[in-house]
Image: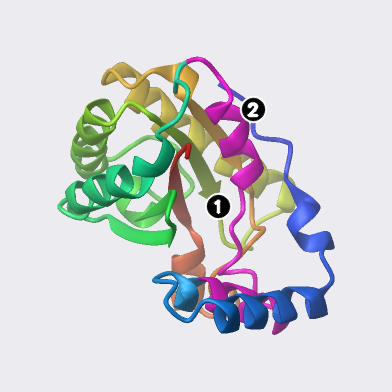
């Protein structure tokens, strides 16, 4: 398991104007792209100063996909493979599944559901949801898994970083104990970085306390 201290900042170094223009060009050039709305929304969000739509962790997923555990890739069938996974993952209680692109899914869990406040010990309900998730992952072994922990801005940055790492690590450990191959997983903590809502409100802070899992296949 990785300690999660390395945060991929490359996404934040891309000029905002370029992000916006790329989104416009992509959607304009391919109006039939089924993921055009998601892609455009992510880029426009970045241009407006929001990071909620950014695809954080793509590089780490590619590193895992380069390993022997995931295999040589799915070729042209990657979309169908991910479609099937998505349908099964959408049946999991307390999980929200989002299709980022043809090869990638993002599964979101509220940390209030997974953990008690300021704790990295999984709740019993979380274990049941993660048990269901682990079963789907075992049925689809040709995908990489990146577990991402986030917190709100309450407390010090150092505390939040450590808490996010412990929470991501707890999820990874549970999945490993349920039979998911550890060599196809990585766990990272992002602390209070990449909020999806306003940390100035209690509702926003609740949304920012979360664990997300990225699942990606190799074309």
Q: Is residue 164 left or right of residue 180?
A: right
Q: Position of residue 211 (x, y in %)?
A: 45, 49
Q: Nearer the viewer, residue 19 or 117?
A: 19
Q: Which residues are magenta?
A: 39-68
- In magenta stretch: residue 49: yes
- Give coordinates of residue 85: x percent, y percent: 25, 45
Q: Secondary structure at mark 2?
A: loop
- Residue at (32, 58) in percent of width and height: 97
According to the picture, the residue beneath numbered tag 2 turns out to be 3
What distance separates the C-alpha of mark 2 from that of mark 1? 14 Å
Would residue 52 be visible to someone looking at this image? yes
How crowded is the residue under tag 2: few (<14 C-alpha within 10 Å), some, or many (20+)?
A: some
Local SS, label 1: strand
Q: Quadrant of the N terminus?
A: top right
Placement of 203 over or under 131, stated as above or below: below
Relative side of 182 to 179, left or right: right
Would residue 193 be counted in the magenta stretch?
no
Image coordinates for residue 91, horizontal then vertical, percent: 15, 52
To which residue does mark 1 refer?
A: 150
Residue 120 appears in which quarter of the rendering? top left
Q: Is residue 217 left or right of residue 5?
A: left
Q: Residue at (40%, 52%) from the top-left corner? A: 105
The disc placed on residue 199 is none
* In front of the other: 49 or 123: 49
């Amino acid at each position: 398991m990785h300690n999660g201290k390395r945060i991929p900042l490359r996404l934040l170094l891309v000029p905002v104007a370029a992000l916006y223009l790329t989104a416009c060009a992509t959607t304009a050039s391919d109006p039939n792209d089924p993921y055009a709305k998601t892609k455009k929304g992510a880029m426009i969000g970045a241009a407006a100063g929001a990071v909620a739509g950014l695809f954080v962790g793509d590089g780490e997923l590619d590193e895992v996909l380069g390993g022997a555990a995931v295999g040589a890739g799915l070729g042209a069938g990657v979309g169908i493979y991910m479609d099937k996974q998505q349908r099964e993952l959408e049946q999991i209680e307390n999980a929200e599944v989002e299709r980022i692109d043809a090869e990638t899914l993002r599964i979101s869990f509220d940390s209030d559901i997974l953990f008690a406040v300021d704790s990295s010990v999984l709740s019993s309900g979380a274990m049941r949801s993660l048990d269901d998730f682990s079963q789907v992952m075992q049925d689809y072994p040709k995908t990489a898994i990146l577990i991402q922990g986030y917190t709100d801005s309450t407390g010090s940055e150092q505390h939040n970083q450590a808490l996010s790492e412990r929470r991501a690590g707890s999820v990874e450990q549970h999945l490993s104990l349920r039979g998911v191959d550890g060599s196809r997983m990585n766990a990272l903590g992002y602390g209070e970085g990449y909020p999806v809502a306003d940390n100035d409100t209690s509702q926003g802070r609740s949304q920012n306390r979360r664990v997300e899992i990225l699942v990606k296949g190799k074309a």
